[in-house]
Amino acid sequence: MLSADLAEDLERHRAELTGYCYRMLGSGFEAEDAVQEAFVRAWRTYDAGRGPLRSWLFHLATNVCLDMLRGPQRRARAMDLGPAATPGAALGEPLPEGRWVQPVPDARVLGPADPADVAVTRETVRLAFVAALQHLPPRQRAVLILRDVLKWSAAETAGLLATTVASVNSALQRARSRLPAVAPLDAEVDEELLRRYVTAFERYDVDTLVSLLHEDATTSMPPFTWWLRGREAVRAILLASGAPCEGSRLVPTRANGCPAFGQYDRDGKPFALVVLEVSGGLIAGETTYLDPGLFPLFELPMSFGAAHRTGG
């Protein structure tokens, strides 16, 4: 295979591989690093006589991910780390980036696909599902993703992992029994709900913001373990916080199969990435990543003025 042909074929698999590595690792940045390393290894070692390129790439990517997952700690959401806080409680000390399930842009993991496949992909890159996957040992995680998400056969999975079909089936059964349940979200989100959310957020209209929440909605702010559950708890913190987000502006994007926004402070500087989870036509979860370093990953401008000039 000519180098140009190989490069083109590698790129065809990038989105699917990134989605796979993201589910394994729980970080958009690490997923991209893993895919790039798999591509480098493929470039060095690929032999057309070895078999289909896709299978070889998944084999390489799996090995890269397993190497990256040798550490003792797993990524999580705030809800996995402790009980809900009470309004007014201190945020506590921030945890390192490596402790959190990080967001990933839809554009990096969905790619061109059949609409039915896109729906499944969205479900399986949502923050709660990716966090649930982190409860599984790495090899069980790989088996479950390959078999239940990507629909590989037991024989294909066994070949990729250099094990037996019986071992794959056993690992899959254990993984399914250990995987925490995840509440379903709306497949399609009402654009009017998002419009009302943006308007209320930018006006700091607490009553309207709270009216858009589920009664038991959650809100969290990585890198802090602090989180709240319940519409009234959110109302209390918004009213008591001295309007720190007043004057903020939002620029839409997509993350983890969900609507998301780059949040800019009153000076137009990047402040946070906000990911919304919607269920039953209301906001069921809001995760506010207090990390402007995520903006380049989502191709969000580093000032609201730039976003406004480009029609963001």
Image (spheres, rainbow, N blue to C red):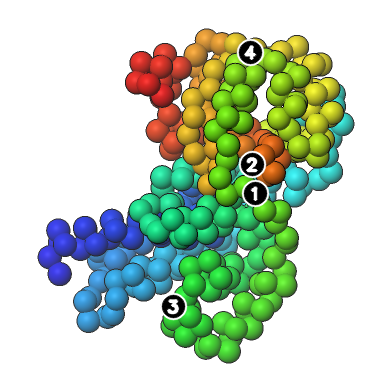
State which tag comes first along the sequence, 3 or 1. 3
Residue placed at 54% from the left, 33% from the top? Answer: 191
Inspect the image, locate mark 4, and give the three-letter code of the amino acid beneath it: Arg
Q: Mark 1 points at which residue?
A: 185
Image depth: mark 3 or mark 1 in front: 1
Q: Name the residue under label 4.
A: 203
**Image x and y of residue 291, in percent:** 56, 31
- CA gap between label 4 and label 1 equals 27 Å
**Image x and y of residue 309, in percent:** 36, 16
Residue placed at 59% from the left, 67% from the top? Answer: 141
Is 240 left, or right, of 306 in this rendering?
right
State which tag comes first along the sequence, 4 or 1. 1
State which tag comes first along the sequence, 2 or 1. 1
Looking at the image, do the residues carrying marks 2 and 1 touch, with CB atoms under 8 Å apart? Answer: yes
Q: Residues within 10 Å of mark 1 (few under 14, many from 20)?
A: many
Residue placed at 41% from the left, 72% from the top? Answer: 59
Is 147 left, or right, of 1 in this rendering?
right
Q: In which quarter of the image is residue 55?
A: bottom left
Q: Quadrant of residue 229?
A: top right
Inspect the image, locate mark 2, and give the three-letter code of the amino acid beneath it: Glu
Q: Tell which of 186 and 86 is nearer to you.
A: 186
Q: Residues within 10 Å of mark 3 (few under 14, many from 20)?
A: some
State which tag comes first along the sequence, 4 or 3. 3
Q: Tell which of 2 and 145 is nearer to you.
A: 145
Q: Mark 2 points at which residue?
A: 277
Looking at the image, do the residues carrying marks 4 and 1 touch, with CB atoms under 8 Å apart? Answer: no
Label 1, secondary structure: give it.
loop
- CA gap between label 2 and label 4 equals 21 Å
